[in-house]
Image (cartoon, grey):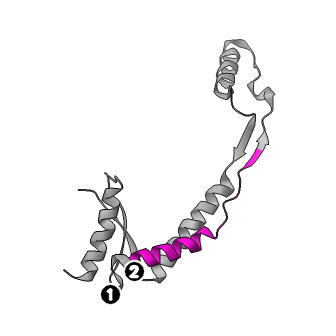
């Protein structure tokens, strides 16, 4: 077997062992000698360290105005107030905006993917058997 095939097989086996039943992305490298499990591990760890340099901020949270659960009148208002209160019972009175968190996580993924691509790896979707 060629080293390229073994490298691809290694990546696919890892994904299958992780319980991926509908398929998943795999990294492959067509450069022969580089496409082995040891080199994948080195490149993956290096790129992961680069991606982890992107800080994930805390979500921007604000205190919820308790009047948001106020009765707006009528039966519909009573029901809406009851639902609002039951959904928020036991929860802190805060609303959080996770936009910055999501953007930072997407940036990490982009940095990782770019780093792997610079090392000759390509990412492709493989359906599970």
From the viewer's side, name the closer residue of 75 and 87: 87
Q: Residue furthest left?
A: 1
- How packed is label 1: few (under 14 Cα within 10 Å), some, or many (20 or more)? few
Residue 116 image point, x, y percent: 47, 77
Q: Disc 2 on helix, strand or loop? A: helix
Q: Disc 1 on helix, strand or loop? A: helix
Q: Earlier in the sequence, mark 1 or mark 2?
A: 1
Task: Write the residue at 45% across / 83% down.
Answer: 119
Write down the region rendered in magenta.
Answer: 40-61
Q: Residue furthest front?
A: 38
Q: Which mark is residue 82?
A: none
- How packed is label 2: few (under 14 Cα within 10 Å), some, or many (20 or more)? some
From the viewer's side, name the closer residue of 62 and 70: 62
110 lies above or below 69: below
Left or right? Give the position of 117 relative to 71: left
Give the residue pinned by disc 2: 39
Marks 1,2: beta carbons within 8 A: yes
Task: Write the residue at 22% across / 82% down.
Answer: 2
126 lies above or below 94: below
Residue 88 image point, x, y percent: 68, 28
Left or right? Give the position of 50 relative to 27: right
Quarter in which the N terminus is drawn:
bottom left
Residue 30 image point, x, y percent: 32, 83
Q: Is residue 116 magenta?
A: no
Residue 108 can be seen, yes or no = yes
Task: Write the residue at 31% across / 58% down.
Answer: 16
Give the residue pinned by disc 1: 33
Residue 42 image point, x, y percent: 45, 78
């Amino acid at each position: 077997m060629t080293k390229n095939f073994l490298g691809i097989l290694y990546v696919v086996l890892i994904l299958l062992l992780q319980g991926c039943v509908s398929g998943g992305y795999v990294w492959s490298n067509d450069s022969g000698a580089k496409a082995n499990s040891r080199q994948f591990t080195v490149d993956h760890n290096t790129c992961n360290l680069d991606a982890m340099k992107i800080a994930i901020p805390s979500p921007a949270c604000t205190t919820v105005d308790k009047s948001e659960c106020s009765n707006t009148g009528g039966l519909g208002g009573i029901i809406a107030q009851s639902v609002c209160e039951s959904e928020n019972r036991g929860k802190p009175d805060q609303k959080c905006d996770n936009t910055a968190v999501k953007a930072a996580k997407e940036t990490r993924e982009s940095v990782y993917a770019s780093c792997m691509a610079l090392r000759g790896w390509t990412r492709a979707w493989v359906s599970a058997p």
